[in-house]
Image (cartoon, coloured by chain):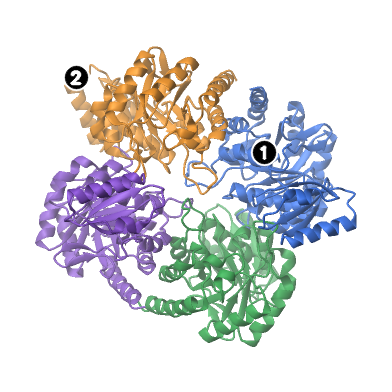
Chain colours: A purple, B green, C blue, D orange
Amino acid sequence: MIIQLENTISPEHLSALEEKLSAIRYQTNRVKTQYGDYIIGVGKAAFDIRSIGTMPGVRDIHQVSDAYKLVSKKWRVEDTIINLGDGIQIGTGHFAIMAGPCSIESEAQVEKTVQHLQEQGVRIMRGGVYKPRSSPYSFRGLGIDGLKMWHQKAREAGIKIITEVMMVEQIEAMADYVDIFQVGARNSQNFNLLDALGEVDKPVLLKRGISGTIDELLQAAEYIFSNGNERIMLCERGIRSYEKAYRNTMDINAIAMLKEKTHLPVIADPSHGIGLRRYVDKIALASIMAGADGVIMEVHEQPEKAFSDGQQTLSFPEASRLYKRMHQAYELREHF
Amino acid sequence: MIIQLENTISPEHLSALEEKLSAIRYQTNRVKTQYGDYIIGVGKAAFDIRSIGTMPGVRDIHQVSDAYKLVSKKWRVEDTIINLGDGIQIGTGHFAIMAGPCSIESEAQVEKTVQHLQEQGVRIMRGGVYKPRSSPYSFRGLGIDGLKMWHQKAREAGIKIITEVMMVEQIEAMADYVDIFQVGARNSQNFNLLDALGEVDKPVLLKRGISGTIDELLQAAEYIFSNGNERIMLCERGIRSYEKAYRNTMDINAIAMLKEKTHLPVIADPSHGIGLRRYVDKIALASIMAGADGVIMEVHEQPEKAFSDGQQTLSFPEASRLYKRMHQAYELREHF
Amino acid sequence: MIIQLENTISPEHLSALEEKLSAIRYQTNRVKTQYGDYIIGVGKAAFDIRSIGTMPGVRDIHQVSDAYKLVSKKWRVEDTIINLGDGIQIGTGHFAIMAGPCSIESEAQVEKTVQHLQEQGVRIMRGGVYKPRSSPYSFRGLGIDGLKMWHQKAREAGIKIITEVMMVEQIEAMADYVDIFQVGARNSQNFNLLDALGEVDKPVLLKRGISGTIDELLQAAEYIFSNGNERIMLCERGIRSYEKAYRNTMDINAIAMLKEKTHLPVIADPSHGIGLRRYVDKIALASIMAGADGVIMEVHEQPEKAFSDGQQTLSFPEASRLYKRMHQAYELREHF
Amino acid sequence: MIIQLENTISPEHLSALEEKLSAIRYQTNRVKTQYGDYIIGVGKAAFDIRSIGTMPGVRDIHQVSDAYKLVSKKWRVEDTIINLGDGIQIGTGHFAIMAGPCSIESEAQVEKTVQHLQEQGVRIMRGGVYKPRSSPYSFRGLGIDGLKMWHQKAREAGIKIITEVMMVEQIEAMADYVDIFQVGARNSQNFNLLDALGEVDKPVLLKRGISGTIDELLQAAEYIFSNGNERIMLCERGIRSYEKAYRNTMDINAIAMLKEKTHLPVIADPSHGIGLRRYVDKIALASIMAGADGVIMEVHEQPEKAFSDGQQTLSFPEASRLYKRMHQAYELREHF
């Protein structure tokens, strides 16, 4: 159960409400976000929803039977649009492309990528400065200095930054240089990190776990929302299956289903979704038809020289052709 | 190694060729199909390919290192187009829709479906008369009599028939009433059935196993081809994954990859691919963007009353809207 | 619902019973096996079970809500023991070892294996004469002649034979030379084959599908039972998972659960369960602790020279050590 | 490549060594642990291993081609034994049982559990004070105060504590009250947490990820080791598969294989491995036969009243019977 409170609710009315909920043995969580003030009630008793909905200070009340509440479309029918400023929006009706290298490597690399994105009209750049690596002996990224350098170049070009945050301690230092915090697949159930990102007023792109379920993804998003941050995007990036022919198995079903279950924007990551450069374009276009609100993808001036994931990275000409096609596919879909 | 023989190859030249191959210790399989005459050689020795390619009676020779040979695109660059007659073709450049109920239930049902397909310009009707059912106590289909009734109605309307064959013994009786034999996911490695379908000059649609790999699917097709039948289509119908939110997980990656690996047409089955009616349209459209040459889908006048799989079956109005959108998506893709 | 009939039930009493079931809208299947005469009723209506149980000609009646009925432990509490003759039994309290090569290769190979088994007191020999092979170009086994040769050698030594049957047409010719028909993982939902094996009075070992569920395995067994053959064993042989370090993932949970769900014997196949020779012993012993009634495993005089699956095959000395350990583990388990 | 250094290596000799490695283009990582001083070299050039092995200050050098190095059995043949003090050891030859509730709930619960363990001779108690929960609205554990209370009760009884740590910030406060830090499945690739646990001189039990590979698990352990902590145990706790009949699929193969690949102790978690109380005993015993050095399991005075995972929790009498059987199975295995 979600109870939306009036901003102006008085302490007395709040107490009355809490007593009422306590009387029917509902456990409650108060949630305050950038945009709203809610009480989440979890309990089993049947009761007349109007008896609460009509109490003073209550704006609205919704029954949500799913394990996730605030991210559900059952109470918020209107889709969430995330505004990054400068006319850049993400969500239903606003197709977004986020492109860039796996890792931020050097100033020259950043400059070339920024120029490519500018020329192509892509407004959001991805790149890693903290890299989760299976082996402790691998390159782990340029860190905060790399981020600052990148931020300066991107700002000059009017380009927004999305990059992965791996631990709570990094958030504060990164916050001034990041437009979207990304939570990687390996941290999709790092609940402390999710909690902490709930306290930041920056959009978060949350990747599905490597073998995460739809339900787990939505509950992970609920962590962020219920800690105060409503600006969340979900990202399908391929799941682990028995098939060894590709690195991951893009789960197109998840995109279609998430768009029905939640009001949050859904982004597709075709680069990781298949992990093989020559197929990324088809997977990107398929994702759009399945309902994706945006695509995050890897591009590099010289994919074969890129750090780590070069084999799933498009060259600039390949990417440029794909941007155009994605817009065409999105247009078709929106005008069906 | 695939050696294409001239139709006119003399017994002497054939002997000379076989001796040559025996000398380099290649195990050979002679393959005669509707369209060609081949020797498949499997061995390890390195040798000068021209020394065989220039022998009399040899049209061409190709190195194919994959476990599958004849179905590989490595030797046959031009995609296979399957001609059903009456102007109906399946393969690159010829988008095909196959629609119909899970099971053929009654004459009235067939008539209504045929009429719907005619109105919508759909030329191929799917339906089951032999149903593979998990439980021995479930309805197993109307059998050969149902097929004959269906065939009569379909012929009158100029509509082709695709239906599943489950055992070798059924092939002969069915052959006169079927335009495409379908091999179901549970029989995707029923090698005797595959062998037998190699001896029939009817197209075969081969479904991927419930947890079959790309490689296994291609090798299953190789069974059919190497027994004499080149008219094969492959079908992605969703795989079994850990995710319980849908019945199967549509593997869009497989569609993209199969179109690169083989010259055979690739068909998508979005109905089984997700198993939930409300998402079938999105999965169908995504499959087209991933490269599918056609779509096979379940429709029924009253999905909620359909045998067995009603929950993944579209109504006629839903299907009609989707046919139109699929053609639009295909058009866009072909003109990128 | 399972209704056990008296052998002596009169046509009048049978008619009365069928009318009664029809009146409550239960769909019925008559099942006659080597041992019993049953009516399986499937329906939804609630009714007083005694009103049927007390009808003349009815021995007993049981409610079984699972999709599988006759193989369920819910109605038959006493476990099925399969008697192969000559004092060889399989089932609870009678541990069985089945060992032999992947493929029957030659007379010499059979002789050596038979001698090894005799020396070790192993009474059942496995081996393939019809091999399901992913590639059409691979060796497919010695066929019926190989089986006859093998049968002669085994009979002389008092050893029983288990071998795979791949198609309905093979059953009749094989039946005289086989003690247990094996259904392979790829045929675990080949329903026509299952039906046909229901009509034979030979024990059947049914392997779980490569990604088959517990429920599907039990329903596959139900096919055999409901066609007349109660002598069925189930076999866990590893499932397909995301893990690439081994060929299959032995599902020990399935063994433990099957022993609770069904009265049929449960056999473990550790050779395929992990697919790597050096671990087969540990997996075999673990399977026994999980509740297996027997083990089927690959042994060969020279594993590295064995056809196809040599890498999961034990040598005679390795196997001999394991037989002894398995008996010790079984003894411990039975005397806990 | 692992180079073991003498404790007494001089700065000059170290420089000479590093120059040598640099000359052959090996990237190096210096690793200092409680027990040793190592240089890990990663590179591709072939070189004469003796040319380094004979340098002054070098104790030994080993080629390890796996992605993981220090945790590999290829260089350290002798298995790691972890000494918890008070005569409690974990590793080859020292079977360990860790039992206790899912969550620490109350003083009374701790007292009853401690008493049960004392009576049964179990020396290590498990329990959660920080609980990773899918939903933000679920109970997340008693936290540090619960841990302190538990620690006091356990110390009095001579019982050691294993409990999960979820974030870097918790380590310091917990360290005085914990004997083994547990890393949960959801944090198995939380690399920052792994790094931080490398800097603590407390044993760490590292659970395999929910769909983690053997290789990822070993590389995660490598993070801890290469940051300075050699006292690591690995834990198989079931993987996510397509099978829905149980919560997880215990991967017995992993236990057998890990014991070959690494010198670290391997612990089985049968409670999560199947997730159903009635089968936990069989899975525990199977795990021992597969090679497990210990078992971690859930017990509760009243399983049906336990927080969260009661359905996989044994009662005290059930657990007592299992402890005895596990010792018997272990004895048998050790004396094969």
The residue pinned by badge 2 equals D10
The residue pinned by badge 1 equals C267
Q: Quadrant of the N terminus of chain B?
A: bottom right
> The residue under label 1 is which amino acid type?
Ile
Quadrant hosting residue D328: top right
Q: Which mark is residue B101?
A: none
Residue B184 picture location, percent across and down: 61, 63
Q: As displayed, is residue B197 above or below residue B155?
A: above
Q: As displayed, is residue D143 above or below residue C162?
A: above
Residue D66 makes an appearance in the image: no
Q: Residue at x 60, y 36 (%)?
A: C256
Residue A234 makes an appearance in the image: yes
**Crowdedness near tag 2: few (<14), some (14–19) or many (≥20) residues, C-alpha within 10 Å:** few
The one of D96 and C244 positioned closer to us in this rendering: D96
| Outermost residue toward the top in this view | D86
Residue D37 picture location, percent across and down: 27, 23
* Chain of the residue displaying label 1: C
Q: Residue at x 65, y 74 (%)?
A: B202
**Crowdedness near tag 1: few (<14), some (14–19) or many (≥20) residues, C-alpha within 10 Å:** many
**Mark 1, mark 2: which one is toward the viewer?**
1
Q: Quadrant of the C terminus of chain B?
A: bottom left
> The residue under label 2 is which amino acid type?
Ser
Describe residue B88's horizontal placement relative to residue D223 as left or right: right
